[in-house]
Amino acid sequence: MAIVYQKSKGLTDAELHYCPGCNHGIVHKLIAEVLEEMGLLDEAIGVCPVGCSVFAYKYFNCDMQEAAHGRAPAVATGIKRTHPTQPVFTYQGDGDLASIGAAEIVHAAMRGEKFTTIFINNAIYGMTGGQMAPTTLIGQKATTCQLGRTKEQAGMPMRVSELLSTLDGCVYAERVCVTDIPHLNKAKKAIRKAFEKQMAGEGFTFVEVLSTCPTNWGMSPLKAKQWLMDNMVPYYPLGVIKETSAEVK
Amino acid sequence: MEKELWKGNEAIAEAAIRAGCDCFFGYPITPQSEVPEYLSLHMPQHGKVFVQAESELAAINMVYGAAGSGMRAMTSSSSPGISLKQEGITYIAAAELPCVIVNCMRGGPGLGTIQPGQGDYFQATRGGGNGDYRTVVLAPSNIQEAVDFVQEAFDIADCYRNPTMVVCDGLIGQMMEPIEWREIPKRDLPPKDWATTGKHGRDHTNIINSLYMDPEECDDHNADLEAKYKLIAEKEVRWDTKDCEDAELVITAYGTPARIALSALEALRAEGIKAGLFRPITLWPYPEKALHDLAGQDHVKAILDVEMSAGGQMIDDVRLAVEGQKPISYLGHAGGVMPTIEEIVESAKKALKEAK
Ligand SMILES: Cc1ncc(C[n+]2csc(CCOP(=O)(O)OP(=O)(O)O)c2C)c(N)n1
């Protein structure tokens, strides 16, 4: 019988611990498939964050480091600068990357560090139980803004892809989501492009994945998908935010 | 061997290169900025990595990444910057990564002063970060020792997979002295087969991590670390003594104050006062037994601890070692003021008088 589908060799056999309807597992799979398809699993070194994906080091079938909260881009800098020919990536949530690790991601992008960051924007702190993130939308309820985020109290949510795109060192930033197959395919293409550009030595590459958190949003998985499309996509537009062609450089 | 005149911080930087340091990650702060300045020029010339990080937090986490992937990594800073590095140091200790951290100490607390200080003793020896961990702490008292210890620190770190600190006060970083580049004995080092270098055909993934969700596993991990620290305490403890054989008054001091104390010894001996110096070289592990035994000698009547710290920090370890056998008094200044020879002589006489 012909095999039509099988689990990527880029993932281990460890059982994922994610909640039903969470997008972390889907994004892991896409990264794993890209690394496998590009033949990079034997070379790759990944860095996982503190957040719901803290155990990603158990799931990826490549060498992994677990960083302190927000510091993954600094850790990845240390790895990539000393292993310049190998693929290096960080996998980070929005509390990790946009809040406590804001300095590290901005400066890694500024320096044009040649690694890839996969940024999971679920508009909330998942692991610690649904507190407000820099990406939480206005009006969105979280356990530290129980009546909904207000601009007066917390400012407007941060568009990280746009922010990093202002830096010359960032050669590629695309925002995607994985709510259905067409979007998922686009997301995989974006991840692949990011790794290709990294391996071509072009600069810092960034893929932001709008993701669901049914548990902390207090919704069913299906409703969460709809909420993402209705509320997140209008504020965080999908598509290529920045792409510097190799020739221009 | 020929002597060369070197500035402390630059000599420390050059020592790192000679020790085979693969990468340096730093951030400017007085009085240690000459270390990153020197390495920014010389590391690339040796085909090695230099990155000026956006902060000390980033620098120490770059060290984590590089050390975790098998490289000889180093960072340096001065007191306020070392405070910022504490997060990274506890993760590095927990993940058992070898690296070298140089602290060219200035006076504190807070911004304090850019003048030399020793107020980071607690932070270095007790662990400024969270959890039960230890860093090996070497304390040179001149530039020759600084360059020797920096080179050795890389081997000690690799030998035990543990962060190793070299703490010198700002004076050692800033002054110039003749030194020689002597051969540092190399240790037999274990292979870094745990490093995340990419699998390259390995049948398992290497993981650098400090997270243990199962409390039993975390307890086991801590027990393993503790066993390692015991071994280090047994094997790596170092100290130096001067004129202690018949000393009635023993001065305890490290770094620059120990050097000033040497001159005070001469002045005291010239007046017929039998004084000696006990100088810890490793601040952790502390030479507890050696000091305990010395304090137990009949000829020792009193101990005077001298530090560049307001109320004394190492004095806690002196007390723990001496265990009340002899009276201990203290002389110290913080904020960049050095204890003078005259002050030490004065305090030594007073300590002896009170003891008799
Ligand atoms: C220094 C530090 N501060 C706070 C925490 C607690 N903490 C763990 S995960 C987390 C938030 C993670 O949220 P996010 O990055 O959005 O990832 P998610 O869990 O949503 O995937 C926080 C605040 C920590 N581990 N370390």
Image (cartoon, coloured by chain):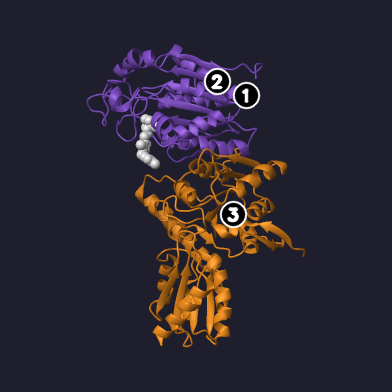
Chain colours: A purple, B orange
Q: In the rendered structure, the residue with mark 1 lies on which chain? A: A
B195 with respect to B47 (left or right): left
Question: Looking at numbered disc 2 in the image, what kind of residue is underneath it?
Answer: Tyr
Residue A216 on image: x %, y %: 29, 28
CA neighbours of label 2 inside 10 A, class few (<14), some (14 to 19), many (20+): many
Residue lying furthest right: B2
The C terminus of chain A is located in which quarter? top right
* Mark closest to the chain's N terminus, 1 or 2: 2
Q: Distance between the residues labelled 1 and 3?
A: 34 Å
Q: In the rendered structure, the residue with mark 3 lies on which chain? A: B
Residue B269 on image: x %, y %: 56, 84
Q: Residue at x 47, y 20 (%)?
A: A162
Asked whether residue B167 is in view, the answer is no
Residue beneath label 1, please?
A: A202
Name the mark on residue A172. 2
Q: Is mark 3 within 8 Å of ligand 1?
A: no
**In which image quadrant can residue B201 be found?**
top right
**In which image quadrant can residue A170 be found?**
top right
State whether discs 2 and 3 lie on one chain. no
Q: How far apart are marks 1 and 2 (CA)?
A: 9 Å
Which one is nearer the viewer's eye here, A95 or B208?
A95
Q: Quadrant of ligand 1?
A: top left
Which one is nearer the viewer's eye here, A134 or A9?
A134
Q: Residue at x 60, y 22 (%)?
A: A196
Find numbered disc 2 in the image and state the secondary structure of the residue it sits on: strand
Find numbered disc 1 in the image and state the secondary structure of the residue it sits on: loop
Q: Which residue is drawn at 57% across and 31% down?
A: A111
Residue beneath label 3, please?
A: B158
Question: Looking at numbered disc 3 in the image, what kind of residue is underneath it?
Answer: Asp
State whether discs 1 and 3 lie on one chain. no
